Image (cartoon, coloured by chain):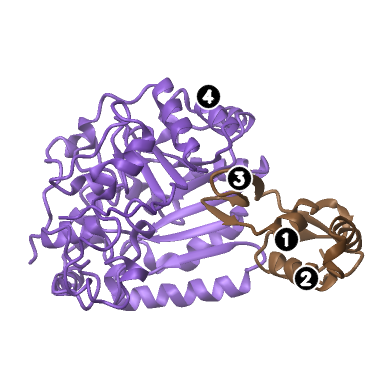
Chain colours: A brown, B purple
Amino acid sequence: MTHTLTLNTLVKLKALYRMQWEPAQAAHVLLYPEGMITLNDSASEILQLCRGELTIAAIIAALEQKFPEAGSLSADIYEFLDVARTNGWIELN
Amino acid sequence: MAGSNSTNISSPRWLLAELTYRCPLQCGFCSNPLDFSRYKQELCTDEWLAVFQQARDIGAVQLGLSGGEPLVRQDLEFLIKEARQMGYYTNLITSTVGMNEARLEKLQEAGLDHIQVSFQAPEEVLNDKIAGTESFLHKKRMTLAIKAAGLPVVLNIVIHKGNIDLVREILDLCLELGVDYVELASAQYYGYALKNRDQLLPSLQQVRQAETIAKAYQEKYQDRMKIFYVIPDYYENRPKPCMNGWGHLFLVVDPEGMALPCHSAKVIPGIHFPNVKEQSVSSIWYDSTAFNYFRGDAWMKEPCRSCDEKSKDFGGCRCQAYLLTGDASAADPSCDKAPGHTIVEQARVSAAHASTTPIFLRNRFNSEKLTPCSPVNEKS
Protein backbone atom coordinates (compact mmCIF):
# COMPACT_ATOMS: atom_id res chain seq x y z
CA MET A 1 0.00 0.00 0.00
CA THR A 2 1.35 3.39 -0.96
CA HIS A 3 1.11 6.30 1.42
CA THR A 4 1.58 9.17 -1.00
CA LEU A 5 -1.08 10.67 -3.19
CA THR A 6 0.01 10.97 -6.81
CA LEU A 7 -1.87 11.43 -10.06
CA ASN A 8 -1.61 7.68 -10.67
CA THR A 9 -2.95 6.60 -7.28
CA LEU A 10 -6.13 4.52 -7.38
CA VAL A 11 -8.54 5.54 -4.61
CA LYS A 12 -11.25 3.37 -3.09
CA LEU A 13 -13.71 3.92 -0.27
CA LYS A 14 -12.97 1.25 2.36
CA ALA A 15 -15.44 -1.59 2.72
CA LEU A 16 -16.07 -0.50 6.30
CA TYR A 17 -17.87 2.59 5.02
CA ARG A 18 -21.12 3.05 3.20
CA MET A 19 -22.15 6.27 1.51
CA GLN A 20 -25.80 7.03 0.94
CA TRP A 21 -28.22 9.90 0.38
CA GLU A 22 -30.23 10.85 3.47
CA PRO A 23 -33.45 12.74 2.67
CA ALA A 24 -33.88 13.78 6.32
CA GLN A 25 -30.62 15.69 6.18
CA ALA A 26 -30.72 16.54 2.48
CA ALA A 27 -27.14 15.35 2.27
CA HIS A 28 -24.93 12.39 1.52
CA VAL A 29 -23.64 10.67 4.64
CA LEU A 30 -20.79 8.30 5.28
CA LEU A 31 -21.88 5.47 7.55
CA TYR A 32 -19.56 3.25 9.57
CA PRO A 33 -19.82 1.19 12.75
CA GLU A 34 -21.81 3.28 15.23
CA GLY A 35 -21.07 6.52 13.47
CA MET A 36 -21.92 8.87 10.66
CA ILE A 37 -20.37 11.83 8.92
CA THR A 38 -22.52 14.27 7.00
CA LEU A 39 -20.74 15.17 3.77
CA ASN A 40 -20.83 18.50 1.99
CA ASP A 41 -21.48 18.57 -1.76
CA SER A 42 -17.88 18.60 -2.89
CA ALA A 43 -16.86 15.79 -0.53
CA SER A 44 -19.69 13.60 -1.76
CA GLU A 45 -18.88 14.35 -5.43
CA ILE A 46 -15.29 13.21 -4.86
CA LEU A 47 -16.11 10.15 -2.73
CA GLN A 48 -18.65 8.91 -5.25
CA LEU A 49 -15.76 8.50 -7.67
CA CYS A 50 -13.59 6.63 -5.17
CA ARG A 51 -14.54 3.15 -6.33
CA GLY A 52 -11.07 1.82 -6.96
CA GLU A 53 -11.35 2.17 -10.74
CA LEU A 54 -10.21 5.75 -11.18
CA THR A 55 -6.84 7.35 -10.55
CA ILE A 56 -6.66 10.75 -8.90
CA ALA A 57 -5.90 12.23 -12.33
CA ALA A 58 -9.11 10.70 -13.70
CA ILE A 59 -11.13 11.94 -10.71
CA ILE A 60 -9.83 15.48 -11.21
CA ALA A 61 -10.60 15.31 -14.93
CA ALA A 62 -14.10 13.96 -14.35
CA LEU A 63 -15.02 16.64 -11.83
CA GLU A 64 -13.50 19.50 -13.83
CA GLN A 65 -15.57 18.34 -16.75
CA LYS A 66 -18.71 18.13 -14.62
CA PHE A 67 -18.15 21.57 -13.06
CA PRO A 68 -16.41 23.62 -15.82
CA GLU A 69 -17.22 26.91 -14.10
CA ALA A 70 -15.22 25.87 -11.00
CA GLY A 71 -11.83 26.10 -12.72
CA SER A 72 -8.93 23.99 -11.53
CA LEU A 73 -10.02 21.56 -8.81
CA SER A 74 -6.81 19.66 -8.32
CA ALA A 75 -5.68 21.42 -5.11
CA ASP A 76 -9.10 21.00 -3.46
CA ILE A 77 -9.32 17.34 -4.42
CA TYR A 78 -5.83 16.58 -3.11
CA GLU A 79 -6.65 18.38 0.11
CA PHE A 80 -9.86 16.43 0.64
CA LEU A 81 -8.29 13.07 -0.22
CA ASP A 82 -5.54 13.78 2.26
CA VAL A 83 -8.17 14.32 4.98
CA ALA A 84 -10.01 11.18 3.86
CA ARG A 85 -6.80 9.17 4.04
CA THR A 86 -5.90 10.53 7.49
CA ASN A 87 -9.39 9.60 8.71
CA GLY A 88 -9.01 6.12 7.27
CA TRP A 89 -11.98 6.40 4.88
CA ILE A 90 -10.11 5.40 1.74
CA GLU A 91 -7.50 2.92 0.63
CA LEU A 92 -4.83 3.77 -1.92
CA ASN A 93 -3.28 1.58 -4.56
CA MET B 1 -41.02 22.19 35.46
CA ALA B 2 -39.12 21.26 32.35
CA GLY B 3 -40.39 20.84 28.83
CA SER B 4 -38.67 22.74 26.09
CA ASN B 5 -41.02 24.53 23.75
CA SER B 6 -38.33 24.79 21.15
CA THR B 7 -39.67 24.23 17.66
CA ASN B 8 -36.13 23.41 16.63
CA ILE B 9 -36.04 19.73 17.63
CA SER B 10 -33.46 17.71 15.70
CA SER B 11 -34.51 14.42 14.17
CA PRO B 12 -33.19 11.19 15.70
CA ARG B 13 -30.12 9.60 14.10
CA TRP B 14 -29.77 6.51 16.27
CA LEU B 15 -32.34 3.89 17.08
CA LEU B 16 -31.23 1.39 19.70
CA ALA B 17 -33.54 -1.62 19.71
CA GLU B 18 -33.19 -3.58 22.94
CA LEU B 19 -34.72 -6.69 21.43
CA THR B 20 -34.69 -8.72 24.62
CA TYR B 21 -33.30 -8.70 28.15
CA ARG B 22 -32.65 -12.44 28.02
CA CYS B 23 -28.92 -13.12 28.07
CA PRO B 24 -26.70 -16.13 28.76
CA LEU B 25 -24.07 -13.88 30.39
CA GLN B 26 -24.20 -12.48 33.93
CA CYS B 27 -21.85 -9.46 33.83
CA GLY B 28 -22.00 -7.43 37.02
CA PHE B 29 -21.74 -4.12 35.12
CA CYS B 30 -24.75 -4.67 32.87
CA SER B 31 -26.73 -1.54 31.97
CA ASN B 32 -30.05 -3.40 31.89
CA PRO B 33 -32.57 -2.53 34.59
CA LEU B 34 -32.04 -4.33 37.91
CA ASP B 35 -35.48 -5.90 37.57
CA PHE B 36 -34.93 -7.04 33.95
CA SER B 37 -36.45 -10.43 34.72
CA ARG B 38 -39.91 -8.81 34.91
CA TYR B 39 -39.85 -8.03 31.19
CA LYS B 40 -41.66 -10.91 29.57
CA GLN B 41 -43.90 -9.36 26.88
CA GLU B 42 -41.33 -8.70 24.15
CA LEU B 43 -42.42 -6.87 21.01
CA CYS B 44 -43.11 -9.29 18.17
CA THR B 45 -41.45 -9.17 14.76
CA ASP B 46 -44.09 -6.96 13.13
CA GLU B 47 -44.08 -4.53 16.04
CA TRP B 48 -40.32 -4.14 15.74
CA LEU B 49 -40.55 -3.62 11.99
CA ALA B 50 -43.12 -0.87 12.51
CA VAL B 51 -40.79 0.86 14.99
CA PHE B 52 -37.86 0.59 12.56
CA GLN B 53 -39.88 2.09 9.70
CA GLN B 54 -41.37 4.90 11.76
CA ALA B 55 -37.99 5.90 13.16
CA ARG B 56 -36.41 5.68 9.70
CA ASP B 57 -39.14 7.94 8.33
CA ILE B 58 -38.11 10.72 10.71
CA GLY B 59 -34.39 10.37 10.04
CA ALA B 60 -32.87 7.53 12.08
CA VAL B 61 -30.08 5.92 10.09
CA GLN B 62 -27.98 3.95 12.58
CA LEU B 63 -29.74 0.92 14.03
CA GLY B 64 -28.29 -0.84 17.07
CA LEU B 65 -29.62 -4.32 17.77
CA SER B 66 -28.90 -4.95 21.37
CA GLY B 67 -30.19 -6.58 24.51
CA GLY B 68 -29.70 -8.66 26.60
CA GLU B 69 -28.34 -10.91 23.93
CA PRO B 70 -30.06 -10.17 20.60
CA LEU B 71 -29.06 -13.57 19.17
CA VAL B 72 -31.67 -15.06 21.50
CA ARG B 73 -34.29 -13.71 19.09
CA GLN B 74 -34.88 -16.24 16.33
CA ASP B 75 -36.24 -13.50 14.04
CA LEU B 76 -32.97 -11.53 14.19
CA GLU B 77 -31.92 -12.32 10.60
CA PHE B 78 -35.32 -11.26 9.30
CA LEU B 79 -35.28 -8.01 11.30
CA ILE B 80 -31.82 -7.21 9.90
CA LYS B 81 -32.86 -7.95 6.34
CA GLU B 82 -35.85 -5.64 6.55
CA ALA B 83 -33.91 -2.91 8.38
CA ARG B 84 -31.18 -3.01 5.77
CA GLN B 85 -33.77 -2.58 3.03
CA MET B 86 -35.13 0.46 4.84
CA GLY B 87 -31.65 2.01 4.49
CA TYR B 88 -30.33 1.51 8.00
CA TYR B 89 -26.70 0.85 8.82
CA THR B 90 -27.18 -2.19 11.04
CA ASN B 91 -25.02 -2.79 14.12
CA LEU B 92 -25.31 -6.04 16.06
CA ILE B 93 -24.15 -5.70 19.67
CA THR B 94 -23.48 -9.19 20.95
CA SER B 95 -21.45 -11.59 23.08
CA THR B 96 -21.60 -14.03 20.08
CA VAL B 97 -23.01 -16.67 22.44
CA GLY B 98 -25.75 -18.16 20.28
CA MET B 99 -23.84 -17.66 17.03
CA ASN B 100 -22.01 -20.25 14.98
CA GLU B 101 -20.48 -20.10 11.49
CA ALA B 102 -23.76 -21.02 9.81
CA ARG B 103 -25.74 -18.34 11.65
CA LEU B 104 -23.03 -15.77 10.91
CA GLU B 105 -23.44 -16.55 7.23
CA LYS B 106 -27.20 -16.00 7.49
CA LEU B 107 -26.69 -12.69 9.30
CA GLN B 108 -24.32 -11.56 6.59
CA GLU B 109 -26.70 -12.63 3.84
CA ALA B 110 -29.39 -10.58 5.56
CA GLY B 111 -27.15 -7.53 5.04
CA LEU B 112 -25.73 -6.99 8.51
CA ASP B 113 -23.19 -4.15 8.34
CA HIS B 114 -21.20 -4.62 11.52
CA ILE B 115 -20.82 -6.75 14.62
CA GLN B 116 -19.64 -5.45 17.96
CA VAL B 117 -18.31 -8.27 20.10
CA SER B 118 -18.00 -7.93 23.84
CA PHE B 119 -15.09 -9.45 25.71
CA GLN B 120 -14.66 -9.33 29.47
CA ALA B 121 -10.93 -10.00 29.77
CA PRO B 122 -7.95 -11.01 27.59
CA GLU B 123 -7.76 -14.57 28.91
CA GLU B 124 -10.15 -17.44 29.47
CA VAL B 125 -10.32 -17.85 33.25
CA LEU B 126 -10.86 -14.20 34.12
CA ASN B 127 -13.15 -13.58 31.13
CA ASP B 128 -15.44 -16.44 32.07
CA LYS B 129 -15.43 -15.46 35.73
CA ILE B 130 -16.52 -11.88 34.95
CA ALA B 131 -19.12 -13.07 32.41
CA GLY B 132 -20.38 -15.73 34.81
CA THR B 133 -20.51 -18.00 31.75
CA GLU B 134 -17.99 -20.05 29.81
CA SER B 135 -17.61 -17.97 26.67
CA PHE B 136 -14.05 -16.79 26.00
CA LEU B 137 -12.97 -19.49 23.56
CA HIS B 138 -16.24 -19.23 21.66
CA LYS B 139 -15.93 -15.42 21.41
CA LYS B 140 -12.42 -15.79 20.08
CA ARG B 141 -13.45 -18.31 17.46
CA MET B 142 -16.41 -16.20 16.33
CA THR B 143 -14.39 -12.98 16.20
CA LEU B 144 -11.96 -14.67 13.83
CA ALA B 145 -14.90 -15.97 11.77
CA ILE B 146 -16.45 -12.49 11.58
CA LYS B 147 -13.12 -11.07 10.41
CA ALA B 148 -12.72 -13.87 7.85
CA ALA B 149 -16.23 -13.12 6.55
CA GLY B 150 -15.04 -9.60 5.70
CA LEU B 151 -17.24 -7.79 8.19
CA PRO B 152 -15.80 -4.94 10.25
CA VAL B 153 -15.04 -6.07 13.79
CA VAL B 154 -15.48 -3.81 16.77
CA LEU B 155 -14.39 -5.23 20.08
CA ASN B 156 -15.85 -3.75 23.22
CA ILE B 157 -14.45 -4.42 26.66
CA VAL B 158 -15.98 -2.87 29.72
CA ILE B 159 -13.03 -1.67 31.82
CA HIS B 160 -13.12 -1.81 35.61
CA LYS B 161 -11.00 -2.62 38.62
CA GLY B 162 -10.94 -6.31 37.74
CA ASN B 163 -9.31 -5.91 34.30
CA ILE B 164 -7.89 -2.39 34.01
CA ASP B 165 -4.36 -3.58 34.78
CA LEU B 166 -4.59 -5.83 31.71
CA VAL B 167 -5.12 -3.13 29.07
CA ARG B 168 -1.86 -4.08 27.34
CA GLU B 169 -2.91 -7.73 27.13
CA ILE B 170 -6.37 -6.68 25.91
CA LEU B 171 -4.91 -4.60 23.09
CA ASP B 172 -2.50 -7.41 22.16
CA LEU B 173 -5.46 -9.76 21.91
CA CYS B 174 -7.23 -7.26 19.63
CA LEU B 175 -4.18 -7.10 17.36
CA GLU B 176 -4.02 -10.89 17.28
CA LEU B 177 -7.71 -11.09 16.28
CA GLY B 178 -7.40 -8.41 13.59
CA VAL B 179 -9.95 -6.11 15.17
CA ASP B 180 -10.78 -2.83 13.36
CA TYR B 181 -11.97 -0.78 16.35
CA VAL B 182 -11.48 -1.32 20.07
CA GLU B 183 -13.64 0.37 22.64
CA LEU B 184 -12.11 0.34 26.10
CA ALA B 185 -15.40 1.27 27.68
CA SER B 186 -15.04 2.37 31.27
CA ALA B 187 -17.86 0.92 33.35
CA GLN B 188 -20.64 3.45 33.78
CA TYR B 189 -22.35 3.39 37.12
CA TYR B 190 -25.98 2.57 36.42
CA GLY B 191 -27.98 -0.61 36.97
CA TYR B 192 -25.82 -3.51 38.09
CA ALA B 193 -22.61 -1.48 37.83
CA LEU B 194 -23.89 1.01 40.40
CA LYS B 195 -24.74 -1.85 42.74
CA ASN B 196 -21.21 -3.21 42.31
CA ARG B 197 -19.44 0.16 42.28
CA ASP B 198 -17.06 -0.59 45.16
CA GLN B 199 -15.90 -3.71 43.33
CA LEU B 200 -15.62 -1.99 39.92
CA LEU B 201 -14.37 1.59 40.25
CA PRO B 202 -10.59 1.62 39.67
CA SER B 203 -8.17 4.05 41.28
CA LEU B 204 -7.00 7.23 39.53
CA GLN B 205 -3.54 5.74 39.26
CA GLN B 206 -4.91 2.67 37.45
CA VAL B 207 -6.95 4.90 35.13
CA ARG B 208 -3.91 7.01 34.20
CA GLN B 209 -1.70 3.99 33.68
CA ALA B 210 -4.27 2.40 31.35
CA GLU B 211 -4.53 5.69 29.48
CA THR B 212 -0.76 5.83 28.93
CA ILE B 213 -0.77 2.31 27.49
CA ALA B 214 -3.80 3.01 25.29
CA LYS B 215 -2.15 6.17 23.91
CA ALA B 216 1.07 4.32 23.11
CA TYR B 217 -0.89 1.65 21.20
CA GLN B 218 -3.00 4.30 19.44
CA GLU B 219 0.16 5.87 18.09
CA LYS B 220 1.97 2.67 17.22
CA TYR B 221 -0.93 0.88 15.53
CA GLN B 222 -2.97 3.75 14.07
CA ASP B 223 -2.91 2.16 10.61
CA ARG B 224 -4.22 -1.19 11.87
CA MET B 225 -6.89 -0.41 14.42
CA LYS B 226 -8.60 2.50 16.09
CA ILE B 227 -8.60 2.56 19.86
CA PHE B 228 -11.13 4.48 21.92
CA TYR B 229 -10.58 4.96 25.62
CA VAL B 230 -12.65 7.34 27.68
CA ILE B 231 -11.77 7.53 31.36
CA PRO B 232 -14.58 7.05 33.91
CA ASP B 233 -16.53 10.27 34.49
CA TYR B 234 -15.92 9.77 38.23
CA TYR B 235 -12.37 10.95 37.48
CA GLU B 236 -13.24 13.81 35.12
CA ASN B 237 -13.87 17.27 36.50
CA ARG B 238 -16.68 17.85 34.05
CA PRO B 239 -19.65 15.63 33.20
CA LYS B 240 -20.05 13.79 29.92
CA PRO B 241 -22.40 15.38 27.36
CA CYS B 242 -24.71 12.45 27.95
CA MET B 243 -26.36 11.19 24.74
CA ASN B 244 -25.38 14.57 23.23
CA GLY B 245 -28.42 15.89 25.02
CA TRP B 246 -31.76 14.42 26.05
CA GLY B 247 -33.95 13.67 23.03
CA HIS B 248 -31.36 15.06 20.64
CA LEU B 249 -30.07 12.16 18.50
CA PHE B 250 -30.73 8.96 20.41
CA LEU B 251 -33.86 6.87 20.75
CA VAL B 252 -33.97 3.61 22.72
CA VAL B 253 -36.87 1.19 22.60
CA ASP B 254 -36.90 -1.44 25.32
CA PRO B 255 -38.02 -5.07 24.84
CA GLU B 256 -41.64 -4.26 25.73
CA GLY B 257 -41.80 -1.16 23.53
CA MET B 258 -41.14 1.64 25.99
CA ALA B 259 -39.42 4.56 24.22
CA LEU B 260 -36.55 6.21 26.09
CA PRO B 261 -33.96 8.94 25.44
CA CYS B 262 -31.23 6.67 26.90
CA HIS B 263 -30.82 3.14 28.30
CA SER B 264 -31.31 4.18 31.91
CA ALA B 265 -33.98 6.88 31.73
CA LYS B 266 -36.72 4.74 33.22
CA VAL B 267 -35.02 4.96 36.63
CA ILE B 268 -36.21 8.58 36.83
CA PRO B 269 -39.54 8.65 38.66
CA GLY B 270 -42.39 10.93 37.67
CA ILE B 271 -41.87 10.78 33.91
CA HIS B 272 -44.32 8.71 31.90
CA PHE B 273 -42.34 7.13 29.06
CA PRO B 274 -44.57 6.39 26.08
CA ASN B 275 -44.88 2.98 24.44
CA VAL B 276 -44.52 2.41 20.68
CA LYS B 277 -47.56 0.14 20.81
CA GLU B 278 -49.71 3.11 21.82
CA GLN B 279 -48.13 6.10 20.09
CA SER B 280 -46.26 6.70 16.83
CA VAL B 281 -42.49 7.16 17.00
CA SER B 282 -42.84 10.61 15.45
CA SER B 283 -45.28 11.83 18.06
CA ILE B 284 -43.17 10.27 20.83
CA TRP B 285 -40.04 12.02 19.57
CA TYR B 286 -41.49 15.46 18.87
CA ASP B 287 -44.53 15.81 21.12
CA SER B 288 -44.28 13.59 24.18
CA THR B 289 -43.73 15.16 27.59
CA ALA B 290 -41.02 12.58 28.30
CA PHE B 291 -38.82 13.44 25.31
CA ASN B 292 -39.26 17.18 25.87
CA TYR B 293 -38.61 16.96 29.60
CA PHE B 294 -34.92 17.84 29.57
CA ARG B 295 -34.60 19.38 26.12
CA GLY B 296 -33.16 22.88 26.04
CA ASP B 297 -31.95 24.38 29.33
CA ALA B 298 -35.10 25.79 30.97
CA TRP B 299 -35.12 22.85 33.42
CA MET B 300 -31.62 23.57 34.72
CA LYS B 301 -30.84 24.61 38.27
CA GLU B 302 -27.77 26.40 39.51
CA PRO B 303 -24.85 26.00 39.05
CA CYS B 304 -25.72 24.69 35.55
CA ARG B 305 -28.16 27.46 34.64
CA SER B 306 -25.54 30.21 34.67
CA CYS B 307 -22.60 27.98 33.72
CA ASP B 308 -20.72 28.99 30.58
CA GLU B 309 -20.17 25.31 29.74
CA LYS B 310 -23.84 24.30 29.78
CA SER B 311 -24.10 24.14 26.00
CA LYS B 312 -21.11 21.77 25.95
CA ASP B 313 -22.22 19.13 28.46
CA PHE B 314 -25.94 19.94 29.03
CA GLY B 315 -25.45 19.58 32.78
CA GLY B 316 -24.33 15.96 32.33
CA CYS B 317 -26.42 12.86 32.80
CA ARG B 318 -29.96 13.13 34.19
CA CYS B 319 -30.02 9.50 35.32
CA GLN B 320 -26.73 9.84 37.18
CA ALA B 321 -27.98 13.05 38.80
CA TYR B 322 -31.06 11.19 40.02
CA LEU B 323 -29.29 8.00 41.07
CA LEU B 324 -26.68 9.86 43.11
CA THR B 325 -28.61 12.84 44.49
CA GLY B 326 -32.27 11.81 44.23
CA ASP B 327 -32.94 14.88 42.01
CA ALA B 328 -32.93 14.36 38.23
CA SER B 329 -32.67 18.12 37.61
CA ALA B 330 -29.55 18.56 39.73
CA ALA B 331 -26.10 19.07 38.23
CA ASP B 332 -24.44 15.74 37.45
CA PRO B 333 -22.27 15.05 40.54
CA SER B 334 -19.32 14.06 38.35
CA CYS B 335 -18.86 17.83 37.78
CA ASP B 336 -16.63 19.42 40.40
CA LYS B 337 -18.85 22.52 40.38
CA ALA B 338 -21.86 20.41 41.41
CA PRO B 339 -23.06 20.55 45.01
CA GLY B 340 -23.30 16.73 44.88
CA HIS B 341 -19.67 16.26 43.85
CA THR B 342 -18.73 15.05 47.33
CA ILE B 343 -20.79 11.92 46.58
CA VAL B 344 -18.41 11.07 43.75
CA GLU B 345 -15.38 11.86 45.89
CA GLN B 346 -16.72 9.58 48.62
CA ALA B 347 -17.36 6.82 46.06
CA ARG B 348 -13.68 6.92 45.02
CA VAL B 349 -12.56 6.60 48.64
CA SER B 350 -15.08 3.87 49.33
CA ALA B 351 -13.97 1.84 46.27
CA ALA B 352 -10.31 2.25 47.23
CA HIS B 353 -10.97 0.73 50.66
CA ALA B 354 -13.52 -1.86 49.60
CA SER B 355 -12.98 -5.44 50.59
CA THR B 356 -12.99 -8.01 47.83
CA THR B 357 -16.62 -9.06 48.16
CA PRO B 358 -17.78 -10.99 45.12
CA ILE B 359 -19.58 -9.07 42.41
CA PHE B 360 -23.39 -9.22 42.46
CA LEU B 361 -24.06 -10.95 39.14
CA ARG B 362 -26.77 -10.00 36.71
CA ASN B 363 -29.01 -13.02 36.49
CA ARG B 364 -32.63 -13.95 36.86
CA PHE B 365 -32.23 -15.17 40.42
CA ASN B 366 -30.65 -11.91 41.61
CA SER B 367 -32.96 -9.77 39.49
CA GLU B 368 -36.06 -11.21 41.10
CA LYS B 369 -34.81 -10.04 44.50
CA LEU B 370 -34.61 -6.42 43.37
CA THR B 371 -37.07 -3.59 43.00
CA PRO B 372 -37.06 -1.56 39.80
CA CYS B 373 -35.16 1.61 40.43
CA SER B 374 -34.37 2.92 43.88
CA PRO B 375 -31.65 5.58 43.92
CA VAL B 376 -28.50 3.92 45.21
CA ASN B 377 -27.26 6.63 47.47
CA GLU B 378 -26.36 4.61 50.47
CA LYS B 379 -22.90 6.13 50.82
CA SER B 380 -23.95 9.75 51.16
Residues at marks 3 and 4, common chain?
A: yes
Crowd rating for badge 3 (residues with CA inside 10 Å; few <14, some 14–19, many 20+):
some
Real-space Cα distance between discs 2 and 1? Answer: 9 Å
B234 relative position to B78: left or right: left
What is the quadrant of residue B173 in the picture? bottom right
**Helix, strand or loop under label 2:** helix
- Is mark 2 in CB contact (under 8 Å) with mark 1? yes
Q: Amino acid at mark 3?
A: Leu
Residue B343 badge: none
Q: Amino acid at mark 4?
A: Phe
Look at 59% across and 48% down and name the residue there.
A26
Residue that label 2 marks: A76
B70 relative position to B218: left or right: left
Q: Position of residue A85 (x, y in %)?
A: 72, 66
Foreground mark, 2 or 4, reads 2
Q: Nearer the viewer, residue B228 or B12?
A: B12
Earlier-in-chain disc, 3 versus 4: 4
B228 relative position to B307: left or right: right
Residue that label 4 marks: B78
| Quadrant of the drawing holding the N terminus of chain B | bottom left
Foreground mark, 1 or 3, reads 1
**Helix, strand or loop under label 3:** helix
The chain that hosts pointer 4 is B
**Helix, strand or loop under label 4:** helix
Q: Position of residue B12 (x, y in %)?
A: 43, 46
Real-space Cα distance between discs 2 and 4? Answer: 43 Å
Residue B144 badge: 3
The chain that hosts pointer 2 is A
